[in-house]
Amino acid sequence: MVVAVSAAAIQLMAGVIDDAVPPDKPRRMPASRVARMVQLVSFKTSRFDVTQETPNESNAYAGESVLRWLGDELAKHRYESTPPDMEDWGWYIDVKGAGNSYLVGASAGVEYKDEPGSALSYDVTPNVMLDWTIQVHKSRTVMQKLLGKNKLAVEDPLCVLVERI
């Protein structure tokens, strides 16, 4: 399933943007709040063993294993990717291919083990069924942004490929 969600919509859902607009008035985002689009792919699987991942030091979000796998799959289709790295919202890889650059993120919420004196690790059984979200962000130059060019779309080749594999 692919869903296009703007950052402004996410802010609205999170309560960052005041939604106290009377129902008879159209809601208009200030120009400073108009945001880029992101493509989201959600799925549930037990295919990835997050117990073998490096725990994310920022938050209890797994994602390294799914991005390692995804990077290998993308390489079969002539996309280059960096090794996964942690971010406060999950994990990401930088991807290049088809003349474009992307940031691809992945996350699945898990809990840390609460064992004093032990190394940081996830508190899940191996190959547990998890809800995953993969997000695709397309890099654009300032000029492309100003001219409204090279926008990320559902039919973007990388988005189609991520959803297919």
Image (cartoon, helix red, strand yellow):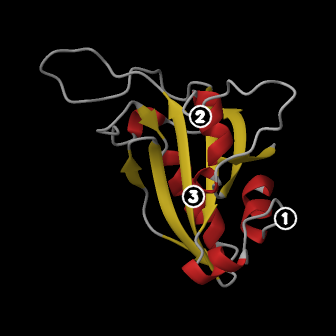
- How dense is the environment of label 1, judged by Cα within 10 Å: few (below 14), some, or many (20 and up)? few
Q: Nearer the viewer, residue 7 or 87?
A: 7
Can the viewer see residue 64? no
Residue for badge 2: 17
- Residue 27's spot in the image, x, y percent? 77, 38
- How dense is the environment of label 3, judged by Cα within 10 Å: few (below 14), some, or many (20 and up)? many
Residue for badge 3: 104
Precedes in sequence: disc 3 or disc 1: 3
Count all numbered tags in the image, as a single digit.
3
Task: State the SS at label 1.
Answer: loop
Residue for badge 1: 155
Image position of 165 with respect to 76: above or below? above
Task: State the SS at label 2.
Answer: loop
Precedes in sequence: disc 3 or disc 2: 2
Question: Could you tell me which residue is drawn at 70 percent across and 82 percent down?
Answer: 98
- Residue 2's spot in the image, x, y percent? 79, 47
Q: Residue 73 appears in which quarter of the rendering?
A: bottom right
Q: Residue 9 appears in which quarter of the rendering?
A: top right
Residue 133 is marked as: none
- How dense is the environment of label 2, judged by Cα within 10 Å: few (below 14), some, or many (20 and up)? some
Give how far apart the Cα atoms at labels 2 and 1 are: 29 Å
User: The C terminus is located in which quarter?
Assistant: bottom right
| Amino acid at dot 2 | Ile
Give how far apart the Cα atoms at labels 3 and 1 are: 16 Å
Q: Nearer the viewer, residue 33 or 50?
A: 33
Question: Could you tell me which residue is drawn at 39 percent across and 30 percent down?
Answer: 60
Question: Could you tell me which residue is drawn at 53 percent across and 53 percent down?
Answer: 67
Closer to us: mark 3 or mark 2? 2
- Residue 86's spot in the image, x, y percent? 38, 49
